[in-house]
Each structure stands twice: as C-alpha cells, then as structure tokens.
Amino acid sequence: MSQPLPLTTLRGHHRTWQVLHAEGELAPLGRLKAGLPRPGVPRFDPRCFTHEEDILTELAALGVRRIAPVYRLGPDERRVHGFIEGEPLSAIRPPGAALAPGELAQLSGLFGRLARVSPAALARVHSCPAALRPRTSRDFMRGLVRFTRRRVFAVHRTALHGLFAALRVDPVVLSPTGPLARDAALLTDRPFCLLHGDLHRDNLIVAEADGMLWTIDWELALIGDPLYDVATHLHLMRYPPSQEHALLTQWARAVDERLPGAAAGLTRDLPRYLAYKRVQSVFTDVIRQAQRVAAAPPEQRDMALATAGEMVSTALRKAARTLGLGRVPSPRAVETVYAAFSAAPAPPSAKSAPAVPAATRRAGRGVAWRRGRSGTG
C-alpha cells in the first residue's frame, strides 16, 4: 500500500499537525492530517475524551455531518484526519464581524445536532470516572471553577504568584466561597449533552467546495450543560451585539427542539457562565503571556511585551466586575508589570513587579467575597 508523503506542518495549541498528500491507492482520500502531541503544553480546560479521534469516530457513526473523517493507515493503523479543504471562518469574517444569515443558521443547526448526542451515546469513549462526573448544572459549573483553581492557577502559582499579585488578580475569585461558586449554586438544571467546548472562528472551516461550515478541533469536547457551550461560543466569537441576540434566539429554538429543557433559565444563567469564561480567560492569558514573554528572543521581546499588555488588559477589563476591579490597568501598565516581572530573579515573589495602583480595586461586591478562603481549595 502506498503511504502518504509529508507535505507541510501546521502548529496547533495542543498538537502539531503534519499535512500529508495521499498518493497511489490512497489518492482518493485527498490531503490528510496526522497529529503529534506537543509535550509540556499546559492545560487550561477540562476534557471528557482521551483522544479526539475517538469522538470523531463516534460522531460519524451517529450521523453528525461536516466533521473530519478519521482513517487508519499503515501497519500500525495510525489514525489520521481527512483535511478539510477551505479556509477558517476567521479569514473571511474576523472577530467582531457579523456572519451571513446562512452561516448563523448552520451554527444553530450544529448546536441542535450536538443536543441530540446524549451522554449514553458516548459512554464507550467517555474517559472521566463515572463517580466523578457531574450530575447537575450546578455541579458542572462548580467543576469548571475547581479545574481552573486546581489545574490552572495552583499549577502555576509558585512561579507566577508575583505576577498575579502585581496585576491585582486575587485567586479567591476561584475559591469554593467566591462569586463564581455562588453563581453555580443558583443555576437552573438542564439536561446534559455533547459540547464542542471550543467553537470559535478558527475552528470553523468554510469549505471551498460549497461554502458550508465544517467543525474541527474537538479536543476540548465535554459532556455537560449545553448553555456552557453557547456561552463559550459567544465569549470567543465576538459577535456584534445585534447578532449575538439572533444567535441566542436560534440556539434556544434548535436545542430545545432536540433536547427539551436545554435552554431553560437562559436569561438568568448565561451571564453566570460568561462571568466564569471571562475570569478563566484572565488566568489563561496571564499564564500564556508570561510564558511567551519568557520564551521570546531578545529581538522579539518588545513585541511580546506589547502583545501581553494588550491581551491581559483586555481580559482584565472584561472580567473586572467579577474580579472586583475598578479602573483596569492600561495595556502600557500591564506591559510594564510583565517587563519588571520577566527581569526579576527566580523564584519570583509578590514583590517581583510593581503593582498596578491600589485605586484600581473597587469596593462593593469584591469586598464581601474576599473574606472567604483564598487557598486553592
């Protein structure tokens, strides 16, 4: 059997992808993608499936359309993906741009198809221990907050405590008594289904053959509350406000038709999930930008610092209310914090970088929940 020949390499966050051109008897398969894990890449999101190929295979068997096919090649039956010929939606409609009505309809249809995929349908490949799986929407959100507390902040706390302190990001926001945990306790229960977990413009491919949207990158797929999936989608897509409302209306109709009760409590609970996503982004962006600044060669350090300033300042602004911040530090102020922190000797401490002014801390909601325990819990 002829083997695919290497063509090029793509770098994803979790895996490096080798794009292969199938030849000989495999030629009808077209281009293929073979993934290689990237060791040491930090995890910022929980997962329910060990291998993306497992879930793609199960979804294909369930009749879910416009996802990459999975093939087994060679004597070791290495699993590879079919390459979706086209370009990311982000190249055509960048963040902040409105989607065409037909694209919006396709997305609501995708959410509807996911709502039909029950936990039982994926039991064979669900990797989380049954005893630890959440049973209610309240437990599901508590689990998200706990993951960010234990597997994101706590893992990087020793190295980056000084950076978080300088930016006035208090980890008590993630505590079992913090505002996110209190929000979780108020959630309406909804039936669980399959969630993509990372549905944004770069993971939607506009097929060159017919202009239809294909969905890629299922590595963060979960079984859980369907409202979390659309909250993540809204957080990442950056729709214009009027189109955000249109998407939500179509989403509610699509999921409720296929999974009655899936859109229950939408108006009350969506802000609670969005608050979590914004806080999660702060912790994720602070850590990622610290790593990128540290890894930048000298000639690229100024650019890395400027990027860190823009991204972290934006994340802080969006999460300011939940974090209890008043005046959010400007990109330039954040850049200064990162420059000082990256120049400090290891191990860094709370004094490693100049803190943003104390006036940025707002009284009110923040004061009450800061009386709670600030450990990682």
Image: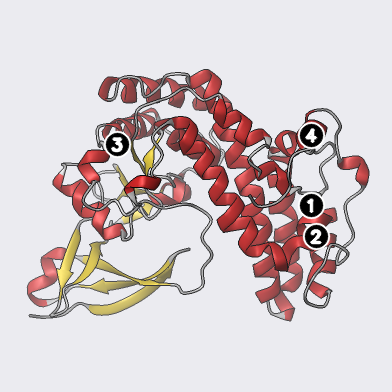
- Residue identified by numbered label 4: 366
Query: Could you classify mark 4 by the number of other residues whose Cα lies within 10 Å: few (under 14), some (14-19), or many (20 or more)?
Result: many
In whole angstroms, how far apart are the C-alphas of marks 3 and 1?
38 Å
Query: Could you classify mark 3 by the number of other residues whose Cα lies within 10 Å: few (under 14), some (14-19), or many (20 or more)?
Result: many
Q: Residue at x 86, y 31 (%)?
A: 363
Give the mark, 4 or 3, whose residue is nearer the N terminus: 3
Q: Residue furthest front?
A: 131
**Foreground label between 4 and 3:** 4
Image coordinates of residue 16 in percent, x first then y, are: 41, 71
Say whether marks 3 and 2 touch (CB < 8 Å).
Answer: no
Q: Could you tell me how many numbered marks the image carries?
A: 4
Amino acid at pointer 2: Glu
**Foreground label between 1 and 4:** 4
Amino acid at pointer 4: Gly
- Which of 44/200 is in front? 44
Secondary structure at badge 4 equals: helix
Image coordinates of residue 359 in percent, x first then y, are: 92, 41
Is 331 located above or below residue 228 in the figure? below
Give the mark, 1 or 4, whose residue is nearer the N terminus: 1
- Residue identified by numbered label 1: 331
Give the mark, 3 or 1, whose residue is nearer the N terminus: 3
Amino acid at pointer 3: Leu
Q: Residue at x 47, y 19 (%)?
A: 265
- Residue identified by numbered label 2: 335
